[in-house]
Image: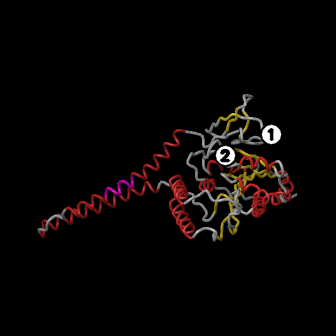
Amino acid sequence: MDRKEHSAANFVREKLSLIVPVYNEEVAIEPFIRAVEPVISSLDADVDILFVDDGSQDLTCEAILAIAKTHAVRIRLIALSRNFGKEAALTAGIDAASGHAVIPMDVDLQDPPELIPLFVREWRKGYKVVYGRRTDRGEDTWFKRITSKVFYFAFNSISQSGIPANAGDFRLIDRCALDALASYRERTRFMKGLFSALGFKTTYIDYKRPARKSGNSKWNYWKLWNFALDGIFSFSTVPIRIWTYVGAAIASLSFLYALVIVAKTLILGLDVPGYASLITVVLFLAGVQLISLGIIGEYIARIFLETKQRPIYTVDYSKSSINENAEPRKGNLKVEGGDGCILTAVSDVRTLAQETST
């Protein structure tokens, strides 16, 4: 039996985990399950859906637990104790996933479930990461499309590990890449950048991004702006390093301007420029200094967050429904001892929460 036949013969034992972060998505749960269930049932693999509730204020958890009782697909739920943000929720799902590969996707069906078999096909060929690349973003506003292009260009220009343009979190990630990702424990998380920083053999599949099927987006432009800053400051030192060159340029221009003033005064006898030009220069330099201090502050704030070593997320086990018999792996949520406490055993993260029976 050659290698391909051997891989195909062993693939029936493979396990896949769909990771679906949700926040106030009560109405989107059932349409998502209806769309995903026939797709995963056609796969020659064991598939489970792992919902991560990011502190929803509606009945999202109840909707997930109710639908798990009426559908054949295996559904698990991890409920975070509060809203930690999508990046933290995605991290919690990856930590708890027991599959040989995971596929993060949105519950609004803008990540088409029909791409999952195509991801699996490329995975079987030996690719460790298979991501979806959006070829048509007609459902986004023109402003969002333009700012997205600007961000991808800026990020890839200054970061050592660029991210593919028009690629979101929707991708298949092999277990070996996930185990490597478990060591990336920074508190300010930009998952698209972390996925790209991993490396490994990667390919992509083009698709047209459909409209959101239900619910409303939780992202506004202010949140997207801050998300973009997190990505840039987490993966590049250029914003802080550039001020060395800005300072050198301003100092050089100031020196040249001083020589011009001295020359005019000594040779032509002209008066030194007065108050208007002086206050203009002072205000300009003050603005430059404040901008540079702001950028330095962004990096210092991130150092402050990292040094506290707080958990990336905390799980509320009174609302969660996880499979305690799943084979544990590094980064899994698993029972420690017999005292009823759960530990997130990933690197330096230690999240304790009280477990109740589900």
Q: Is residue 288 magenta?
A: yes
Q: Amino acid at mark 2?
A: Ala
**How far from the left and from the top, in percent, is residue 260?**
21, 66
Q: Dot 1 surroundings within 10 Å: few (below 14), some, or many (20 or more)?
A: few
- The residue at the point 63 percent across, 45 percent down is 183
Q: Dot 2 surroundings within 10 Å: few (below 14), some, or many (20 or more)?
A: many
Q: CA distance from mark 2 to mark 1?
A: 18 Å
Q: Earlier in the sequence, mark 2 or mark 1?
A: 2
Q: Amino acid at mark 1?
A: Asn
Where the C terminus falls, by quadrant?
top right
**How far from the left and from the top, in percent, is residue 321?**
76, 42
- The residue at the point 64 percent across, 62 percent down is 167
Q: In the rendered view, tell whether residue 222 sits above or below residue 312.
A: below
State the image quarter where residue 170 is shown. Answer: bottom right
State the image quarter where residue 291 is shown. Answer: bottom left
Residue named by callout 1: 325
Q: Position of 74 compared to 183: left or right?
A: right
Where the N terminus falls, by quadrant?
bottom right
Q: Are dots 2 and 1 in contact, CB under 8 Å?
A: no
- Element under disc 1: loop
Q: Position of 211 compared to 241: left or right?
A: right
Question: Front-most of 270 and 203?
Answer: 270
Magenta region, residue range: 285-292
**How far from the left and from the top, in percent, is residue 166?**
62, 65
Q: In the rendered view, tell whether residue 129 sits above or below residue 332.
A: below
Residue 111 is tagged as none
Residue named by callout 2: 92
Question: Front-most of 306 and 219?
Answer: 219
- The residue at the point 11 percent across, 68 percent down is 269
State whether the magenta stretch is mostly helix, strand or loop: helix
**How far from the left and from the top, in percent, is residue 204?**
69, 64
